[in-house]
Image (cartoon, helix red, strand yellow):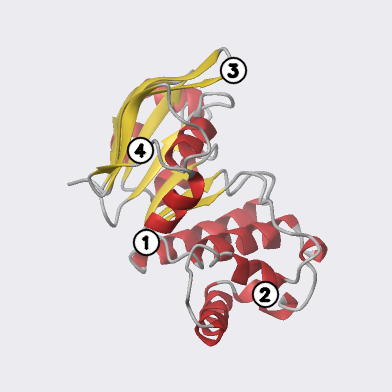
Amino acid sequence: MALLELRGISSHYGNVQALKGVSLHVNEGELVTLLGANGAGKSTTLKTISGLIVPTEGEVLFEGKPIHRAGPEAIARLGISHVPEGRRIFPGLTVRENILLGASNRKGVPRKQLEKEADEKFEIFPEIRRFENALGWTLSGGQQQMLAVARGLMAEPKLLLLDEPSLGLAPLIVQNLFATIRDIRKRGVTILLVEQNANMALSVADRGYVLETGTLTVEGTPKELLGNEQVRAAYLGGHHG
């Protein structure tokens, strides 16, 4: 049984249909990437999974149970953590406070335990450790992205939804971030990654889907997608080699 399954999902923003009959699945322990141009519906897919958008058709199943009518808080409590595009950290809180906020879905966990887990997140992202008492707004874009992922991990997710983590970051920072995403996955977290940097995404993924104007067009292993002429032309900067 897949950990996450979308069956014939259609979603709208007002009168605009953003998703048209999208079906996909993510198995436990997998890292699956969703590729596509701007406006293809990638963020809408993640928002539909995390309950920010209620689909007009179809169903979202998590651990075999329908969740598409549950609200975002209930979905978060099931173990789905959504790291949205644009980082959305709290600028007036310290880095440590931002990380601790990620555990707000876990009621009744002792503060001491949460502080210990926050320390563990600094081990995953050593680059932000020295800023733990600095305010969120003082961090660079790359550091804010690391903080956003660290905060997402504090929810102890069974499924981590990452929306465009590399957006606006320098190439070297992107490489470091993706090395960390690979590590997180090795720790047993299942990941659904939305990413415009197709080469980077496919370098860490087990499988990928391509979304075009709200419809899934291609799916396959990284090798299959890298070998697909259509995919190469559209997302991988034409022909390589």
The amino acid marked with disc number 3 is: Gly
Residue in the picture at 64% in, 64% down: 147
Residue in the picture at 35% in, 66% down: 186
Q: In the image as oriented, which residue stretches furthest toward the bottom?
A: 112
Is there CB contact under 8 Å for labels 2 and 3? no
Secondary element type, mark 1: loop
Q: Which residue is mark 2?
A: 96
Task: Check disc 1: other Cα within 10 Å, few if <14, some if 14-19, many if 20+.
Answer: many
Provide residue 89's location: percent of width, then percent of height. 70, 57
Query: Which disc, if any, is residue 189?
Result: 1
The amino acid marked with disc number 1 is: Val
Q: Is residue 226 visible?
A: no
Is there CB contact under 8 Å for labels 4 and 1? no
Query: Which disc, if any, is residue 119?
Result: none
Provide residue 167's location: percent of width, then percent of height. 64, 44
The amino acid marked with disc number 2 is: Arg
Please tell me in which quadrant of the rendered image residue 93 appears: bottom right
Query: Which disc, if any, is residue 208?
Result: 4
